[in-house]
Image (tube, rainbow, N blue to C red):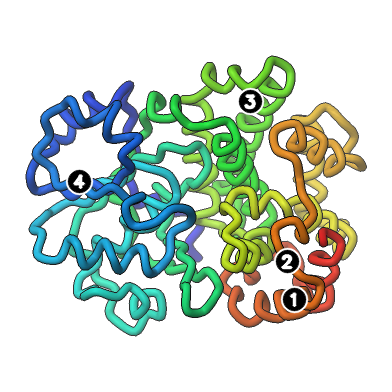
């Protein structure tokens, strides 16, 4: 039984210029990024790479139409490496571009109707402290025609190199920083209680949880600007959380968030945040023994409270970063709730297999209704 795998080499540079020199960027590189990152960090370096500005193809979460449009525009471009510089959208898009034989449509890849063969080297530089995607073999995209998100998980899209550059976080607005950082916390917490967790993954989960919660407490006490003092710490913690969930997986928090994100275009981290503590309260109620007991004790120690009130204290701390909203405020309708619960069971078994305890369709519906 495999316990742990890390197929990505991790690097750290102080700034993008050092990275460009160290990796000898040139005309055989396809760089997928955003204009707001290209202008301050890359434009003045005289690089001969082929640049793609992701926002030209749409805003928000990654989707198949966005990916297909970039495929069409880069058709015939000759390159050996894909360099992803951005948040989750840029990273999830870029992972598909290393595959052989995509043509002009990524859907057959998500449906695994074509062989998944890697033919390009992949270098990922995250610019949010949350996705962890730089060390996972997963790409998530909204499939517009199906009104849901789908995940493609295969080692063919695993990065060869992940690069941590703290300066790239500096321009990230606080709300996006907070949402992505909460997402990293959820990666660590969900993977801690996964049936696939083991001593190696839990070591990563615990390191990430403690670092992230320490930064959150600092922001709550000192204000939003405190995050700039801990940019490197947060990037590293998100990376380590990515290693944890890349090996152990995430579960119902992510699974229940997908209909919200897919139907109402709620950003991934914010969507996960809505379900985080409610799912874990459901786990606790259904199986109040096992690894969740240990998790609660670890979280309580980090939060400075009793284990019996750990999720209330967590809600209080996270609420000081981002306010949690009722699902109806995103547009969800009462008559949709049952259908969302049924769709989660039908389409998200890849994630639900990682649940701490199995949840029925009625229990999933009850979680949605408690947050409605």
Q: Which residue is mark 4?
A: 51
Please name the residue shown 19% across and 31% down the image.
20
360 w.r.t. 301: above or below: below
Q: Nearer the viewer, mark 2 or mark 3?
A: 2
Q: Earlier in the sequence, mark 3 or mark 4?
A: 4
Q: Nearer the viewer, residue 303 or 124?
A: 124
Label at residue 215: 3
Please name the residue shown 24% across and 61% down the image.
98
Q: Nearer the viewer, mark 2 or mark 4?
A: 2
Q: Is residue 218 left or right of residue 152?
A: right
Q: Nearer the viewer, residue 289 or 245?
A: 245
How far is the residue under mark 3 from the one under mark 4? Answer: 34 Å
Q: Secondary structure at mark 4?
A: strand
Q: Which residue is mark 1?
A: 336
222 w.r.t. 295: above or below: above
Image marks 3 and 1: residues in contact by CB distance under 8 Å: no
Q: Residue 201, position in %: x, y?
A: 56, 48
Specify few, some or many for label 1: CA neighbours under 10 Å numbering under 14, 14-19, or 20 or more.
few
Q: Nearer the viewer, residue 188 or 332?
A: 332
Image marks 1 and 2: residues in contact by CB distance under 8 Å: yes
Residue 103 shows in the view: yes
């Amino acid at each position: 039984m495999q316990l742990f795998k890390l197929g990505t080499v991790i690097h750290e540079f102080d700034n993008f210029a050092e990275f460009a020199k160290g990796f000898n960027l040139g005309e055989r590189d396809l760089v997928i990024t955003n204009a707001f990152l290209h202008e301050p960090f890359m434009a003045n370096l005289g690089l001969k790479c082929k640049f793609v500005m992701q926002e030209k193809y749409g805003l928000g979460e990654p989707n198949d139409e966005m990916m297909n449009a970039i495929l069409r525009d880069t058709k015939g471009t000759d390159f050996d490496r894909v360099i992803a510089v951005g948040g989750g959208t840029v990273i999830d898009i870029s992972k598909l571009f290393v595959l052989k034989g995509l043509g002009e449509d990524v859907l057959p890849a998500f449906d695994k109707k074509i062989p998944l063969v890697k033919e390009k080297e992949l270098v990922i530089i995250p610019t949010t402290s949350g996705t962890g995607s730089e060390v996972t073999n997963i790409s998530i995209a909204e499939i517009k025609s199906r009104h849901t998100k789908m995940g493609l998980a295969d080692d063919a899209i695993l990065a060869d190199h992940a690069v941590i550059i703290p300066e790239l976080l500096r321009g990230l607005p606080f709300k996006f920083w907070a949402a992505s950082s909460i997402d990293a916390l959820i990666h660590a917490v969900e993977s801690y209680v996964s049936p696939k967790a083991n001593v190696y993954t839990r070591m990563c989960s615990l390191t990430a949880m403690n670092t992230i919660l320490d930064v959150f407490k600092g922001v709550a006490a000192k204000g939003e600007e405190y995050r700039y003092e801990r940019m490197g710490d947060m990037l590293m913690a998100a990376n380590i959380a990515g290693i944890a969930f890349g090996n152990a997986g995430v579960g119902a928090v992510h699974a229940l968030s997908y209909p919200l994100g897919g139907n109402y275009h709620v950003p991934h981290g914010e969507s996960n945040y809505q379900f985080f503590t409610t799912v874990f309260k459901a786990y606790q109620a259904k199986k109040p023994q096992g690894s969740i007991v240990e998790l609660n004790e670890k979280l309580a120690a980090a939060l400075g409270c009793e284990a019996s009130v750990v999720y209330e204290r967590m809600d209080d701390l996270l609420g000081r970063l981002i306010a949690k909203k009722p699902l109806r405020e995103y547009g969800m309708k009462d008559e949709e709730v049952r259908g969302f619960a049924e769709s989660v069971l039908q389409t998200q078994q890849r994630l639900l297999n990682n649940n701490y305890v199995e949840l029925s369709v009625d229990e999933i519906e009850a979680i949605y209704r408690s947050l409605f």
